[in-house]
Image: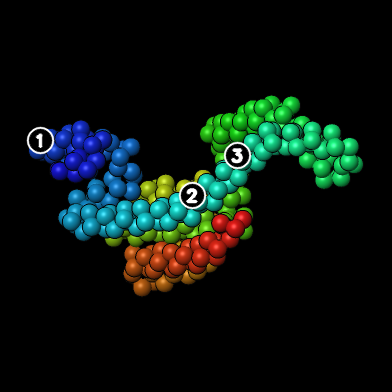
């Protein structure tokens, strides 16, 4: 209840939650009034915990999930923040040099009467181009970027194609794929242990993939499971998930320990993510 002291923006929300809980409303129904604060995974787990009488266990697991997610986001932010900052500075300095310093140097070279090399002529052409057409090119690139964002937002075909392509781009594609599998299986383990049905579990889990292509694959998985197929066969038919994941799912279904095997999958791909980050980190700053 005192959390609003550290997070002032939550103060009115927490006060309203407290008031509604004292009025006799269930925790899940109260939280559902704030979908921007409590996502579908959170709400689904709370509802299942209330129904199964394991709300205390569910809250602890939700805390662990949020802490893990925060740590992961911080690491990814640290990985890309420094290179992007350096790149921005380099581009800014280059633009200033090419539009302010280089033209003056070129005038000096021309006045000296010495013949200019091919590299110097190229530098002159780039400098003139930036001075004369740089603003137009910048506006064109800005419009191109805005148009791309609009297409991603309003065209599911373009969004689907982009997300599928992103999963196939070298180490970064593998990283995104493994991150999605890690998130999905961790959420599935949480919701399964809380007692949600496969239908509810799959509907909520596909929202955390962060990838429209994988989310569409989950719709096929859900239809296959609802038609009577096993979870393993449903995942195997999509060909969008790693073979290692399918094998562990099969073991979990056969042994009756699906929640534990889902956690094993998540931990396995967390190690894979760590391995890929260890490969990317030494290259990010030099590049």
Q: Residue at x 23, y 37 (%)?
A: 8
Determine whether 271 is above or below 100 in the image: below
272 with respect to 17 (left or right): right
Question: Residue at the location (69% across, 33% down)?
Answer: 99
Q: Nearer the viewer, residue 236 or 33?
A: 33
Q: Residue at x 24, y 41 (%)?
A: 7
Q: Which residue is mark 3?
A: 92
- Whole-number angstrom distance, CA of label 2 to CA of label 3: 17 Å
User: Which of 18 and 76 lies nearest the eye of the viewer?
Assistant: 76
Residue 110 placement, left or right of 73: right
Residue 250 in view of the camera = no
Q: Position of residue 232 (x, y in %)?
A: 46, 63
Quadrant containing the C terminus is bottom right
Tell me: residue 157, above or below residue 131: below
The residue under label 2 is 81
The part of the image, by quadrant, that contains residue 33 is top left
**Disc 2 on helix, strand or loop?**
helix
**What percent of the width, then of the height, locates residue 14?**
19, 38
Whether tag 2 and tag 3 are in contact, CB under 8 A, the answer is no
Q: Quadrant of the N terminus?
A: top left
Q: Residue at x 77, y 31 (%)?
A: 128
Q: Earlier in the sequence, mark 3 or mark 1?
A: 1
Question: Marks 2 and 1, Cα distance to the nearest angstrom?
Answer: 46 Å
Q: Earlier in the sequence, mark 2 or mark 1?
A: 1
Q: Which residue is mark 1?
A: 23
Q: Is residue 250 left or right of residue 58?
A: right
Q: Give the mark toward the camera: 2 or 1.
A: 2
Dot 2 alpha-carbon crowd within 10 angstroms: few under 14, some 14 to 19, many 20 or more: few
Camera-near label (3 vs 1) is: 3
Q: Is residue 170 above or below residue 99?
A: below
Can you give x and y, in whole percent of width and height, for residue 173 in the image? Answer: 57, 56
How many numbered markers are drawn? 3
């Amino acid at each position: 209840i005192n959390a609003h002291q550290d997070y002032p923006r939550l103060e009115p929300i927490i006060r309203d939650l407290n008031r509604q809980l004292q009025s006799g409303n269930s925790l899940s129904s109260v939280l559902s009034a704030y979908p921007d604060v409590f996502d579908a995974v959170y709400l689904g787990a709370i509802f299942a915990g209330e129904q199964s009488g394991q709300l205390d266990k569910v809250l602890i697991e939700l805390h662990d999930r949020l802490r893990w997610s925060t740590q992961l986001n911080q690491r990814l932010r640290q990985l890309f923040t420094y290179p992007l900052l350096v790149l921005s500075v380099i581009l800014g300095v280059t633009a200033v040099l090419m539009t302010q310093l280089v033209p003056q140097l070129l005038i000096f070279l021309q006045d000296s009467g010495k013949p200019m090399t091919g590299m110097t002529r190229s530098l002159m052409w780039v400098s003139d181009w930036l001075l004369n057409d740089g603003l137009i090119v910048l506006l064109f690139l800005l419009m191109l970027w805005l148009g791309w964002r609009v297409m991603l937002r309003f065209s599911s075909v373009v969004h689907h194609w982009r997300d599928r392509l992103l999963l196939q781009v070298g180490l970064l594609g593998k990283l995104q794929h493994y991150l999605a599998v890690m998130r999905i299986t961790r959420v599935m383990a949480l919701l399964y242990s809380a007692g949600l049905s496969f239908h509810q579990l799959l509907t909520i889990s596909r929202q955390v993939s962060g990838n429209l292509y994988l989310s569409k694959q989950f719709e096929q998985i859900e239809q296959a499971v609802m038609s009577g197929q096993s979870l393993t066969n449903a995942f195997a038919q999509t060909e969008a998930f790693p073979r290692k994941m399918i094998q562990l799912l099969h073991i979990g279904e056969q042994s009756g320990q699906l929640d534990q095997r889902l956690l094993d999958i998540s931990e396995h791909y967390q190690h894979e993510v760590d391995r890929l980050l260890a490969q990317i980190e030494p290259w990010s700053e030099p590049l």
